[in-house]
Amino acid sequence: MSRGATVWLTGLSGAGKTTIAEAVAEHLRAAGREVEVLDGDELRRGLSAGLGFSRQDRDTHVRRVGFVAELLARHGVITLVPVIAPYAATRDEVRAQHDARATSYLEVYVATPLAECARRDVKGLYARAIAGELTGMTGVDDPYEEPDKPDLRLDTTGMDVTTAARQVLDLLIERGLG
Ligand SMILES: Nc1ncnc2c1ncn2[C@@H]1O[C@H](COP(=O)(O)OP(=O)(O)OP(=O)(O)O)[C@@H](O)[C@H]1O
Ligand SMILES: [Mg+2]
């Protein structure tokens, strides 16, 4: 069996987490690997339905997703997790749970700056937050604690998706997981 791993893509809304995860997943599937994408938006409709955006609910969401990711990764699946995960302590908890089982865990900080994320405004959330119609928006009026030692830092400003995905794939190869 190939070695599994969790690849957590953390960063602001619109940073490119989902887009990069899907591109990486497509590439790995084509190479015959077992791959899953645990997308924050999707899981909030299922596994984490009913949770909101308070610190407590965000932490519960991240812990649940982390639990499922570790299970999959332990069984040989490359598990890509595009989930904001704004709190450093909670991300560290998830990493520690992987470490406790010797399951590989990589943190990719999709470090696209707020101004670029707001310019893209894929979901129209930044416009609503700036207009005061939405509160608790990560990076606007809710915290985002930047990772200080990510395995990879990717600012996607002016970068194409293929290049961004390539950097994640190269990281996997470098760590013997590709
Ligand atoms: N190099 C790049 N990598 C990823 N996305 C890029 C890149 N360049 C431009 N984009 C665009 O940026 C947007 C990123 O949106 P995406 O939904 O992936 O963000 P996200 O980080 O998953 O946000 P959310 O937390 O709201 O789910 C997409 O419209 C994508 O096409
Ligand atoms: Mg997303």
Image (cartoon, rainbow, N blue to C red):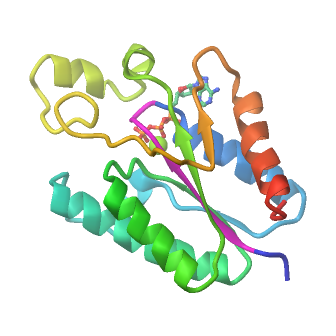
Numbered range of the magenta stretch? 4-14
The residue sitting at 58% across, 86% down in the picture is 101
Image-based side of 44 in relation to 57, left or right: right
Q: Residue placed at 44% from the left, 40% from the top?
A: 11
Residue 46, can we see it?
A: no
In the rendered image, residue 153, in percent from the top left (x then y), is placed at 59, 37
Residue 169 is at least partly visible in this image? yes
In the image: residue 114, left or right of residue 50: right
Residue 5's quadrant in the figure? bottom right
Question: As displayed, is residue 170 above or below residue 94?
Answer: above
Of the 4 image quadrants, the one containing the N terminus is bottom right
Would you identify the image quadrant in which residue 146 lies?
A: top left
Q: Is residue 98 magenta?
A: no
To which quarter of the image does residue 167 belong?
Answer: top right
Q: In this rendering, is residue 123 above or below 4? A: above
Which x, y percent locates residue 82? 51, 50
Q: Relative to 156, is 58 above or below?
A: below
Viewport quadrant of the C terminus: bottom right
With 41 as the anchor, is 78 left or right in this view?
Answer: right
Q: Position of residue 134 (x, y in %)?
A: 14, 31
Q: Pick the residue in front: 76 or 109.
A: 109
